[in-house]
Amino acid sequence: MDLKSYLTFRYQEAYDESPWYGTAVRQIIAQLTPPILTVPLPGSKKQLGQIVLHMLAWRQYALAHLRGENDYRLEVNSPEDWPEATIWNNESVLALRDRLDQNQKDLLQAIHEFPLVKMGTTVPGKSYTYAQLMEGVYTHDIYHAGQLQLGWRLLKENGLI
């Protein structure tokens, strides 16, 4: 399996298939209701909705760079990286799911179109390659998928939802 096929497989597996380690991101997101996304986690000011928006922010960052938008910036711990808490409703949840689904399609297309010879090239202004960036997105999703599931469990166990 070549690198692009491998990355495509991993993106699809982590986002909307059946990964060996647990539940795919899309399945988790599909179960998150407005209250689940809105209520702060016990002992924290963070909401699960903020985690999902954080995931989307880095997916958008990667997509921009794969498309050659090298001026696209996302600073760690900035308001763009971790948006403010919000009150979610049915419309905003559906819009979030649509944004994530579209981003997934766009990322898969960008990976397909990205020149294989540039995979080992360093992303302008960064210390990592395009291949590392592409791997980073789905591993970042996996990491936060675990947080979403644990956060959901904590909200339930503490009677917050």
Image (cartoon, rainbow, N blue to C red):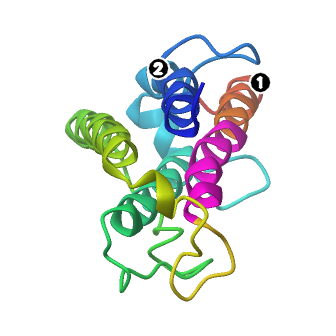
**Residue at 46%, 35% in the rendered image:** 35
Position of residue 140 in the picture relative to residue 107 (left or right): right
- The secondary structure that dominates the magenta segment is helix
Q: Are marks 1 and 2 in contact (CB under 8 Å)?
A: no
Q: Is residue 127 above or below residue 85?
A: below
- Farthest front residue? 117
Choose between 104 and 134: the one closer to the eye: 134
Which residue is tagged 1?
A: 157
Residue range corresponding to the magenta coloring: 130-144
Q: Nearer the viewer's eye, disc 1 or disc 2?
A: 2
Residue 142 screen position, x and y as percent: 67, 36
Q: Secondary structure at mark 2?
A: helix
Residue type pointed to by label 1: Glu
Q: Is residue 8 above or below residue 53?
A: above
Position of residue 94 in the picture relative to residue 16 (left or right): left
**Residue at 46%, 20% in the rendered image:** 16
Q: CA distance from mark 1 to mark 2?
A: 27 Å
In which quadrant will I find the C terminus? top right
Residue 101 screen position, x and y as percent: 31, 34
Picture quadrant of residue 109: top left
Residue type pointed to by label 2: Asp
Picture quadrant of residue 66: bottom left
Around disc 1, counting alpha carbons within 10 Å, would you say few (fewer than 14), some (14 to 19), or many (20 or more)? few
Of callouts 1 and 2, the N-terminal one: 2
Residue 133 screen position, x and y as percent: 59, 60
